[in-house]
Image (spheres, rainbow, N blue to C red):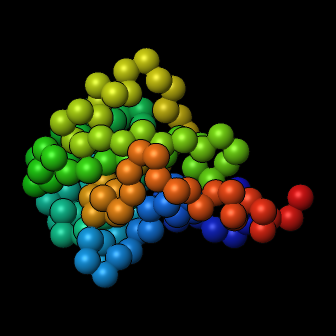
């Protein structure tokens, strides 16, 4: 954990995924995944990167509302499990294949990142975790 920094920001950064980028992610939004019916998913398509907190238990429904809101099937998605904690790990895919990649895995707690920022990293990336962990007080 990084004291004072939301896991919505810390998790992606520790995965080597900055939420903003001059070309691929000029904007981002953070939403809760508890009640997917409360959002205008077509309006959220206007942001380059979407961060969904607490959405892993409703992942198939999340994919449905994203697709209905205009996100393309090949939109990149990352699931960051145990964000900003020891043991953080990431699972990557797109809106077509991510549900299949998660079968049988315990995803909670997780942060889900969709869109431009995910394209800034890939499996096997150089994580910032070791450098940040060295800077943290024991």
All told, the count of numbered labels is 0
Q: Residue at x 38, y 74 (%)?
A: 20
Quadrant containing the C terminus is bottom right
Q: Residue at x 49, y 60 (%)?
A: 16
Would residue 53 be seen by someone viewing this image from the given angle? no
* Position of residue 95 measured from the top left corner of the image (x, y, whole percent): 22, 41
Q: Quadrant of residue 63?
A: top left
Q: Quadrant of residue 46?
A: bottom left
Q: Viewed as shown, does residue 81 lie left or right of 102? A: right
* Position of residue 64 measured from the top left corner of the image (x, y, whole percent): 18, 39
Most extreme residue toward the right, as rendered? 138
* Position of residue 88 measured from the top left corner of the image (x, y, whole percent): 60, 44
Q: Residue at x 35, y 62 (%)?
A: 120
Q: Residue at x 34, y 28 (%)?
A: 101
Most extreme residue toward the top, as rendered? 104
Would residue 82 be seen by someone viewing this image from the given angle? yes
Q: Viewed as shown, does residue 3 lie left or right of 11? A: right
Q: Viewed as shown, does residue 78 lie left or right of 5? A: left
Residue closer to the observer: 92 or 45: 92
Query: In the displayed structure, would residue 28 be above or below residue 60?
Result: below
* Position of residue 45 measured from the top left corner of the image (x, y, whole percent): 18, 63
Quadrant containing the N terminus is bottom right
């Amino acid at each position: 954990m990084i004291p004072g920094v939301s896991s919505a920001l810390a998790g992606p950064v520790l995965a080597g995924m900055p939420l903003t980028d001059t070309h691929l992610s000029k904007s981002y939004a953070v939403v809760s995944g508890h009640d997917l019916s409360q959002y205008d998913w077509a309006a959220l398509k206007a942001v380059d990167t979407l961060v969904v907190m607490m959405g892993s238990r409703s992942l198939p429904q999340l994919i449905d509302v994203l697709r209905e809101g205009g996100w393309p099937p090949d939109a990149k998605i990352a699931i960051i499990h145990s964000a900003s904690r020891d043991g953080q790990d990431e699972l990557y895919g797109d809106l077509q294949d991510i549900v299949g990649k998660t079968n049988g895995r315990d995803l909670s707690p997780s942060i889900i990142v969709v869109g431009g920022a995910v394209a800034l990293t890939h499996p096997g990336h150089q994580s910032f975790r070791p450098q940040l962990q060295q800077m943290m007080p024991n």
